[in-house]
Image: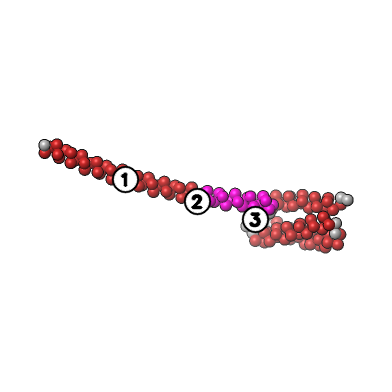
Amino acid sequence: MKKFFLGALALVFLTVISCKDAANKAEEAADTAEEAVEEVAEKVEEAAEEVAEKVEEAVDGVPSFDNKEVQDYVNKYEEYMAAYKKAAESKDMTAFAELGQQGQALGTAAQEIAGKLSGDDAKKWTDYMTASAAKMQEYAKAMTQQ
């Protein structure tokens, strides 16, 4: 009977120790899973921010630039294009003449800005200016139509 009791007691100890090991392993797995979930959440958040920025650019048509001077120029150019559109739609030749001087100043500034572009900003700049030129042609065309 003693042997049976000692054998059963040893079995209970082994079971308890095994359960503790299993509990520790489960705890470690939960910690690892939690870390993985946090990493994925961070990556998803970063991706969401990038997508939001690209959507905003697509909606506005105005990219954001790293260089503050370039961004300021683009903002001024957007204001110029809005005034140009308004003058073209209303066929206001006086306003259109005044915009000519502003356009020349912006053209000169564009040449200076072009030398300050980084690689990524250079592509954004080219795409933006191409799209803007197309818009300006549409506005001018609207002005000449009767």
Q: Residues within 10 Å of mark 3 (few under 14, many from 20)?
A: some
Name the side, left or right, on which 15 lies relative to 94. left
Span shown in magenta: 42-61
Q: Which residue is mark 1?
A: 23
Q: Quadrant of the N terminus?
A: top left
Q: Who is closer to the viewer here, 105 or 79?
A: 79
Residue 56 image offset from top left, x and y in percent: 64, 52
Is 6 included in the stretch rendered in magenta?
A: no
Note whether residue 100 is visible. Answer: no
Residue 135 image offset from top left, x and y in percent: 77, 51
The answer for how far apart the CA atoms under marks 1 and 2 are is 29 Å
Name the side, left or right, on which 143 lies relative to 30. right
Residue 111 image offset from top left, x and y in percent: 73, 58
**Residue pictured at 51% horizontal, 49% vertical:** 43
Q: Which residue is mark 2?
A: 42
Residue 118, located in which quarter of the rendered image? Answer: bottom right
Q: Amino acid at mark 1?
A: Ala
Q: Amino acid at mark 2?
A: Glu
Numbered disc 2: secondary structure? helix
Residue 30 image offset from top left, x and y in percent: 38, 46
Q: Which residue is mark 3?
A: 64
Q: Nearer the viewer, mark 1 or mark 2?
A: 1
- Marks 2 and 1: in contact by CB < 8 Å? no
**Residue pictured at 77% horizontal, 49% vertical:** 134
Q: Nearer the viewer, mark 1 or mark 3?
A: 1
Q: Nearer the viewer, mark 2 or mark 3?
A: 2
**Residue pictured at 28% horizontal, 43% vertical:** 19
